Amino acid sequence: MGKRPTLALALALLASAGLSARAAASDISSTHAYIQANYALAKAGVARIGSAQAKIHAFNASLGQRCPNVGKGALEVEATQPLSSEVVVALWSIAYGNSAGPIHTFVAATRHLRWGGSKTSRIAARYAKSLGEMASLPLPDLCKDVGAFAATGFKLAPAAVVTLVEHAESIELEPVPPRLLAPFERGSDRSVLARTAGLETKLEESEFSLGQTDWIEVLDTLGLPQ
């Protein structure tokens, strides 16, 4: 009689150990897959900076031909803000759309990854979803929208513009923090993660410096204030 609880306990401990081992193995494989996919995405993003800029310059040149100074006369007031922000959305649409292929590859590679810690799984899934949303942002017709704004005497932004801007600005791009991946890194994972961080820094610097210049140039083409 006395041996039965001991045997049951031993079997339970063995089962628990087996589950823990499988969970740990899943965490390790998911971490490795995520790190590799994120590195490939960052590398592709840096490689596409030049082509994204070329598309943005072509877009601005097209605006200069189709509707130069269509927003001239607009004041730097709250009513104008949605149109200025829509220019940012247009630039995001071009830049992220230019990397749609690598983004979709990343989403496919990480879609089914799971960690024992549900927080990591949620962040990874949300990041992939947000990237997909950014890559599919529609390119707004700035000539039409600023023209409609001008037709109101620069008093009322089109409702569709406000909706688009609110949607785009609500998208949060938060990758999995390195501290959540660190316990499951193996082999070259840490060095790949470090290279990814360097590439992401370059992308962020490019988005800030080039993005700011692009935004000002497009606003100038449209005749809108900053």
Image (cartoon, grey):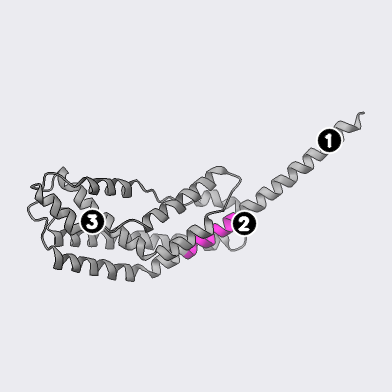
Q: Residue furthest top?
A: 1
What amino acid type should be assigned to the residue bearing mark 2?
Answer: Ser
Q: Position of residue 109 (x, y in %)?
A: 53, 60
Element on which disc 1 rests: helix
Q: Does residue 219 appear left or right of residue 185 in this picture? A: left
- Mark 2 burial class by Cα count in 10 Å: few <14, some 14-19, many 20+: some
In the picture, the quarter occupied by the N terminus is top right
- Lower sequence index among marks 1 and 3: 1
Residue at the spot of label 2? 29
Q: Residue at the location (19% across, 68% down)? A: 62
Dominant SS in magenta: helix
Q: Nearer the viewer, residue 69 or 207?
A: 69
Examine the rendering and report whether any part of residue 123 can be seen.
Answer: yes
Disc marking residue 91: none
| Location of mark 3 (residue) | 87
- Find disc 1 in the rendering and name its residue: 8
**Foreground pick, 23 / 163:** 163
Disc 2 versus disc 1: distance between alpha carbons? 32 Å
In the image, residue 74 above or below residue 95 = above
Question: Horizontal and vertical percent for residue 128?
Answer: 46, 53
| Whole-percent x, y for residue 152 in the image | 10, 47
Q: Is residue 213 left or right of residue 135?
A: left
Residue displayed at 29% across by 45% down = 166
Q: Secondary structure at mark 3?
A: helix
Q: Where are the magenta residues, as a range? A: 30-40
| Residue visible at 17% across and 64% down in the picture | 63
Give the image location of residue 171, x and y in percent. Answer: 37, 48
Circle 1 residues within 10 Å: few <14, some 14–19, many ≥20: few
Q: Earlier in the sequence, mark 2 or mark 1?
A: 1
Could you tell me how far apart the alpha carbons at marks 1 and 3 are, in whole angstroms?
67 Å
